[in-house]
Amino acid sequence: MPSIILGIYFESELGDYFEEAYAWHNRTGPLHTRSGFRMMEVHDLYFDFELPWWSKVNGNPETHMPRTMAYLNANFEGSELAMRLTLIKRGLEAGRDELIKITKRYLLQVPILLLVLCNRKRGGPFLRAVLSILHENSDRAPGVNLINDVDTDSDLSSPNWGRYIYNNPEERPDDEEAWCNLLSKNEESINDLIHFWLQFCMNWPILTDDLQRLSKATEASVMTGGEGVSLLIFKSNYSILFECLDAVFGTMMSNSRLCEQIHGMMRHGLRSSVGIQQADHQRMFSTMIDYPMKEERRNMVTNTAEYRQKKRRQPNLQKPKDK
């Protein structure tokens, strides 16, 4: 019986983590009126909640599992205590490894990785690392100006930009070095960075001013004001860069459960006689045109007194007929 109770405590406190993550996705965020579309903030969730949670709980399980550890220490001893503690730590390590595996495959891969630019704490160092990779590999895009810097052919960047060129790599700050290693871990990663940098038009002159100011940004202090404040400040300070990223990721679903549900509905309703392009157009019409029109009609109807009067059950004033 104690081992069963211990397992219930463990599942309950581990469930608190998943409930918080689900609740984050279920909130609308600062940009949308519907939940599930918070891709622009997804790295805030990862770096400020998910990664610290798993790091702390693996280093000291009592930080996030006080009831589990209290029950373990009170009801087990000796080899039984050591065995149960080993099982708990093994499960926590497996959870952390799974998180890292998923994030390496998606969140820490270009193009989604470019959303780190929106992160208030890491946007500046990340951009300087990106500029450094683009500068060192500019020959891979001949005839294209990847960075609108007048001194890109020299050993120093212009004073309008934050420093991203280092003759001695050891002078590069640790946080920028970590981003550089991630962005240039193989040839494919470098090619992907250049490809999506150009595809998102990040090298256009209209973005130069925002990129220059962001490249000079240092790590920001802790911000108060709740969720979404950081993204709204980024939108205000770097409006053109925000619009560039929002045009790509603004309507991308951050909630994997919602993606899976829509995928299932698409597969269920797809007929073999309908081409994929026709199915795409039908889906776009249903989500972008038909649904807002129906929602507007529903709101208009439900807000009228006439509708409420019709829906109100009328008393039966007629006398029952004599049999």
Image (cartoon, helix red, strand yellow):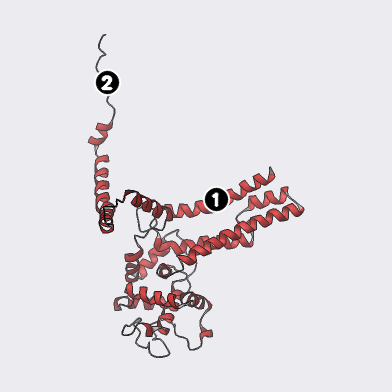
Q: Position of residue 101 (x, y in %)?
A: 52, 64
Q: Residues within 10 Å of mark 1 (few under 14, many from 20)?
A: few
Q: Which mark is residue 316?
A: 2
> What is the quadrant of residue 156 in the picture?
bottom left
Q: Which mark lies nearer to you, 2 or 1? A: 1
Indicate the amino acid at tag 1: Gly
Q: Position of residue 64 (x, y in %)?
A: 60, 55
Q: Position of residue 74 (x, y in %)?
A: 72, 49
Q: Which mark is residue 219?
A: none
**Residue shown at 63%/48% (left/top)?**
7
Q: Is residue 212 above or below residue 225?
A: below
Q: Quadrant of the N terminus?
A: top right
Which residue is more in the foreground, 195 or 151? 195
**Residue shown at 59%/49% (left/top)?**
11
Q: Is residue 39 above or below residue 196?
A: above
Alpha-carbon span between mark 2 and mark 1 = 52 Å
Q: Which mark is residue 15?
A: 1
**Residue shown at 50%/53% (left/top)?**
20
